[in-house]
Image (cartoon, coloured by chain):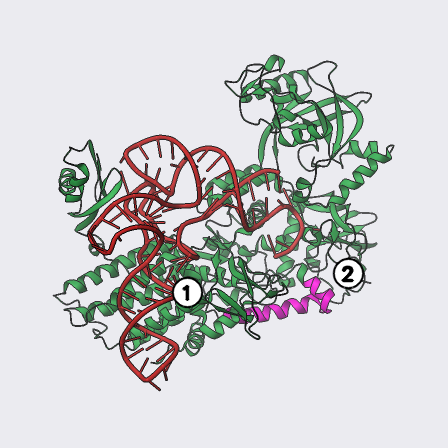
Amino acid sequence: MARYNFKENEQKWQAVWEDKACFQVTEDASRPKYYVLEMFPYPSGRIHMGHVRNYTLGDVVARYKKARGFNVLHPMGWDAFGLPAENAAIENKVPPADWTRENIATMRKQLKTMGLSYDWTRELATCEPGYYRHEQKMFLDFLANDLVYRKESWVNWDPEENTVLANEQVIDGRGWRSGALVEKRQLSQWFLKITDFAEELLKGIDTLDRWPDRVRLMQENWIGRSEGAHVHFTLDGRDDKLEIYTTRPDTLFGASFCAVAANHPLAQELAKDNSDLADFIAECNRMGTSEAAIETAEKLGFDTGLKAQHPFVDGHALPVYVANFVLMDYGSGAIFGCPAHDQRDLDFARKYDLPVIPVVAPKGTEPETFAVGDEAFTDDGLLINSDFLNGLNVPDAKSKVIDRLEDMGIGTRAVNYRLRDWGVSRQRYWGCPIPIIHCGDCGIVPVPEKDLPVELPADVDFEGTGNPIARHPTWKHVDCPKCGKPAERETDTFDTFFESSWYFARYCAPQADEPLDRAAVDYWLPVDQYIGGIEHAVLHLLYSRFFTRALKKCGYLSVEEPFAGLLTQGMVCHQTFKDADGKWLFPSQVNLEGETATLAETGAPVTTGRSEKMSKSKKNVVDPEAIIEAYGADTARLFMLSDSPPDRDLEWTDAGVDGAWRYLNRLWRLVAESAAPLAAPDAGKPDALDSSAEEVLKSVHKTIDGVSGDLEKFHFNKAVARIRELTNAIEGLDGDAAGADWVRRLGLETVTLLIAPMTPHLAEALWVELERGGQLVADTPWPEADAAYLVDDLMTIAVQVNGKLRGTIELPKDCAKDVAEDAALALDKVQSVLEGKPPRKVIVVPNRIVNVVA
RNA sequence: GCGGGCGUGGUGAAAUUGGUAAACACAAGGGACUUAAAAUCCCUCGGCCUUACGGCCUUGUCGGUUCAAGUCCGACCGCCCGCACCA
């Protein structure tokens, strides 16, 4: 039996779609629009299975919505600036631009073999001046609209390479290449005022009703709105005050110390005359800048000897520490410690032997006996040991204590956000140049618009240390646009999140002279459905939400939220393999027979490990190109959708791929090679249908209804299961039954249309076999379910006794409760369990269940 | 450390959102076809007990609410993701 020739077919239909420009779109006010977007890839070299999953999900949505009559925008492009290009330049001596463009060419070719319904005329790459000149313009607009400022901030500094390191390049406190101990250094950098929008970004989350709850929660926590107070402590022997921020002013009477960040001005000042403190601060500065590193480090403090006076208790002096767990970027960079009611403070107090005074006791405990051991008490309760606050609950105490602080003029009520302003300066070559000129006389001067874009120099060398763009012999030297004297360009480039914060808007009119074409963005935005990895839950999505608001403020667009719907897909995982020496092996090197794995080449034993996220380092990767070569794109796509819901991790298995492949062939044979009779394409419904044919007819309509609902909710795996069930039903249809040939045609055409978004090439081939080739499936509307076939007259109802299933009964739909009760009680099984006694109670849930309580 | 999530047969999962747990597949075992293999088709397939009819148990663990819990509540265990310069 001939198999379905996927290779020939996939190439054929891809060419047809392209020739007919099936997926090219323009604004069309007469149709509802639908904008589907998958997160654009970083051009790392080759596509991986994560891409295949992401783009398959997007393509199913795009093709389904098109069939549903929407004007669908579905673009693709490249997030082309980033560190890997610079690493490649250093390792292989290839210019980042060449490396990136070659990768794009390879990956574009690979993507095209997947049969994705992109409007390729809208393709963009962020590393091209035609793209980044617009974000330089936007930056200047942000500057003009007071959304940008400069401040000192800390970076990871590799003293050997003389470069700034990314957090991922710092491994155990050392530079990944040099191995040198990393230091923190302060640099003057550009910041965007995302905190101006903190409240708006927080409120906006409520409008994102088609985002996963967990992502909304993560964003909410990231913004981290808190209500508390600033409190000013007087310092013995000094005129200045120590300002702290606290969310628990109610616990002030339990204070036993104050602590400031290592980079707090007070710490810096005291360190000048105290070399031990200077050493301690230097030690803190060796920790790297990542919050995870800071928070997991052992809590250390240095007693400055200074004393802070308690605001309410005369003569109660608190020692002032410099502590490594206090963050300079949060609040005022200083805290007061109340060990009894904060775990970190408690750990710190136990270590440095500071008093632990409980001031909140759980309701119902005796205040005298309440003590804190190794666990701080952080819940609500009643205030004790707290003078005028005694007996209040925590919220009331907070309010009262702040009133008192305000009356005394030593504190204020304050709202604080965990969110920090967005530092966008990067000391790197492969990014968008920041369009600023530094002039000795005029200071900071924006590059005039007519001089945009500021293009990256192509002739840079990566031999030396430091930022190659800053070392370039001529690039940075310019005349000041204001005064004409020699000046220097800014050599920093933008964070690559800058490019990805507005690309979705650029797709609306990627060739426009202006950054954004107003009519186009007004038509297409917001993105109706955005699809990508959960790893972007906070940063990329929050920056894009901020950028959209900033662009609105500058008059570029009208929407506030860029992404109306969000689907976050899980990772693609695979089993891991190691050889006898413990070295990782590629799955393609391994023969797997049942549970035993051997090395394909030598037959040597192989240890199998658990399934983990596919990664180059563990070699548990499967190359999509090899899969598409061997099985075709439709098989890969179907497998991606069949077994796991999209938001969960997906285990890639050869057996699963085989299963998808077999199903496609089975469907092909069923349509193209089956001997069973098939009615003519336009034959009317026969008057008489055999009951078996009637059943299949019903399931055709139920499947249309079910699959449509599944696709709307992104339950692709369930949709596949339903289509397979319908296929089984059609296959089991007796060819001689009255009307079977007609139902069979309807069923096969339906299966073809329903599966088309998932396996579009096969669907087109089936459509031709079904003599429907006059129109492409890609241009054919979605089938409609006839409501008359969706309801059953008879319902199967479960009968339980005391919650345990004892049998089932068939009853007419929506039958009266007492009818159901009588039928249930009439069951022999029920009677025998009841042992002749009358039931105590009978619960009837119509069309579902009868529960007899004995 | 902080924040978020996940946990159901040998495996991926489904369960109309509190109402028949395991749909649809994969793997495995048995059979048919074949000189043979591949492909295809048919049967069995959560566990324990039972010759059978059937019975009991089962959704990470423990407890709770309810006529009824995979689903709700509480505690615990395990794994995964993010933490602001990876994208």
Q: Nearer the viewer, residue A795 or A310?
A: A795
Residue A150 is covered by the magenta coloring: no
Identified at 71% across, 19% down, the residue is: A310
Location of residue A767 in the rendering, given as x and y in whole percent from the top left corner: 32, 72
Mark 2, other Cα within 10 Å: few <14 / some 14–19 / many ≥20: many
Residue on which disc 1 sits: A638
The letter of the green chain is: A
What stretch of residues is rendered in magenta? Answer: A85-113
Read off the chain for label 2: A
Give the Cα distance between marks 2 and 1: 46 Å
Q: Nearer the viewer, residue A271 or A576?
A: A576
Q: Quadrant of residue A696?
A: bottom left
Residue A104 is covered by the magenta coloring: yes
Location of residue A488 in the rendering, given as x and y in whole percent from the top left corner: 80, 55
Say which label, 2 or 1, has the lower sequence index.
Answer: 2
Q: In the rendered image of this protein, which colour is used for chain B?
A: red
Question: For the residue marked with disc 2, what is the amino acid?
Answer: Pro
Q: Is residue B39 above or below residue A660?
A: below
Q: In which quadrant is the C terminus of chain A drawn?
A: top left
